[in-house]
Structures are given as structure tokens and as C-alpha cells.
Amino acid sequence: MLVSVALLASSCGTVEEYVLLNDIDVSEQMRMQPAHELHVKRGDDLRIVVTHKLPQLAEMFNNKINTLEEGESLTVFTVNSDGYINYPLIDTVFVEGLTCSEVEQLISKRIDDAGLARGVTVNVKITNFKVTVIGESATGIYEFEDGRATIFDLIAKANIAQGNNSGYNGIGIRRDKILIMREVNGIMKSEFISLLTKDILYSPYYYLQQNDVIYVWPSTTTIRGSNRIVDFWLSRLSIVTSAVSVVTLVITLFAKKTQQ
């Protein structure tokens, strides 16, 4: 019984270990960090839409293709390994490291400088924004069509905070130890974040970036539950406990019979 109680106590989660953003004071007003604007990376797919008061001028730049699944759609321009896209009528454009707004201004200026059309409006969007989740929960690739997502958007979409129900009481992951790996200018950066405190709201990893990799760390109870040595001894303890119970019952019945 003592061993059972000890195991149950060690597997119970507290508010500080389980509840997200548990230190938020609802009476406090918090100043949020400005929304992060994505920077274009190699391998990104860009959808570029040019508009003009004369539609026929804009059509020169808006290449359209026909697909069986989506019907007519705009051509997507992929950033090559050197950071360029090949854009109609203005040749190659270097876009790596620029924000979508900066790419819009650059293409508009290139069109204007070439004398092809004046006063065009350019809209640029990254269409293959995705992040990868691996580890204890919600493993998979998740895409966001609007090109912007926070860590809580991912939690809601991938159901990360629920874990995989392999841990005791359904606590399968470490909510205070989520690893985010991010490529920045050819360098892989890594950072542990916690979902339990409001500090995440001010973290540079609050806003996700394309191709982020999130590793969901298993909880202590999940690791303990997967330990074969512990499982071995727990199973043996169960057998011994059952045997002791049977022997105790037999002795008790024998003692009663003797007294009679």
C-alpha cells in the first residue's frame, strides 16, 4: 500500500506543472510585442499578385496556370539556392532575407524602373509556411495559410498540450520544456520555452517562423513509465503482493478454524 501511494503521489501534477500561463494576473494589462514579419528564405514559395488601374497591364506579370484540383491559379515563384526568383519581364530578383513588404516594394520599383508599368501595386505572400512537430506529442507537419502563426496557434492546431495520453493522468509531455529549433542566416539556433508562464508572450519564439522544428519533451512520468527495469520490478511487486495477500488470507482462515 505504501509503495502504491508513493507511486500515485509521484505521478500527480500540480498547477505549476500542468496549467498553461498559470502566473497570469487577469487584472494586469500586458503590452504585447509587435507581430513578427517573416523574412524570405531559400526554398520559400512566393505568390506574387500585381494589380493596376489598367488590368491588362497587370496580366503581363500575373502568370496563371490551370490545375485539375484548384482550377485557375497564379504561378508560385520558388526562391532558389542563391536567394533569387525568376520573375517575368524583369529577370532575376534577389529576395532572400527580405520581408514580404520589402519584396513588394522591390518588385514594384523594378517594374517602374523598367518602364513596363507605373503605379502598380504588388502583394507578396509565402504560401508554404509550415512547422514540424516531433517527439512525445502531435508529430507531423503543420501548415498555416495566412503565413503567420504563434506558438499557441500551433498548440490549438496540433493539440500539443494534451500530450499523447501515455503518461499517468494523461500528462505525457513537459509543458515547461518545449524545444524550438530555428535556422537563421544558415545557422541553426535552439531554445527551450515554457508554456506555463507568461514569459512566453515576450519570447522571440512566440511568433513561429517557416520551417521551425518543435520537439515536445516527454514528462518524467512518461519516461518512468517507459523504463523496462521499473516495469519489471513493478510487475514482480504485483505478483509478490498478490501472493502475500493469498497467504495472509489462508493463515487467517486457518487460525479461525483452529480457534473453533
Image (spheres, grey):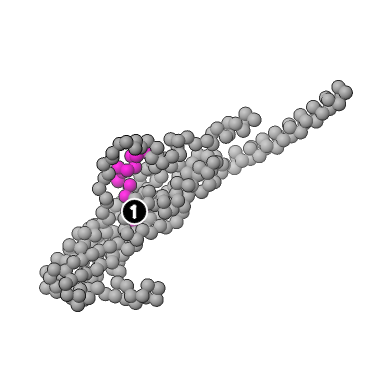
The count of marks equals 1
* Span of residues in magenta: 197-212
Quarter in which the C terminus is drawn:
top right
> How far from the left and from the top, in percent, is residue 31?
26, 41
Q: Where is residue 95 in the image (x, y as percent from the top left)?
A: 23, 62
Q: In this view, does 3 lie above or below 171?
A: above
Asked if residue 24 can be seen in this view, the reply is: yes
Residue found at x 35% / y 46%: 190
Q: Where is residue 142 in the image (x, y as percent from the top left)?
A: 40, 57
Q: Is 24 positioned to the left or the right of 9 in the image?
A: left
186, above or below 16, in the image: below
The answer to which image quadrant residue 111 occupies is: bottom left
Is residue 208 rendered magenta in the image?
A: yes
- The percent coordinates of residue 114 (x first, y second) are 13, 72
Q: Is residue 54 magenta?
A: no
Q: What residue type is labelled 1?
A: Ala
Residue occupying image coordinates x 46% and y 52%? 138
Q: Which residue lies furthest to the front in this view?
A: 27
Frontmost residue, 53 versus 134: 53
The residue beneath circle 1 is 149
The quadrant of the picture occupied by the N terminus is top right
Q: Is residue 119 left or right of residue 176?
A: left
**In the displayed structure, does residue 258 sit left or right of residue 184?**
right
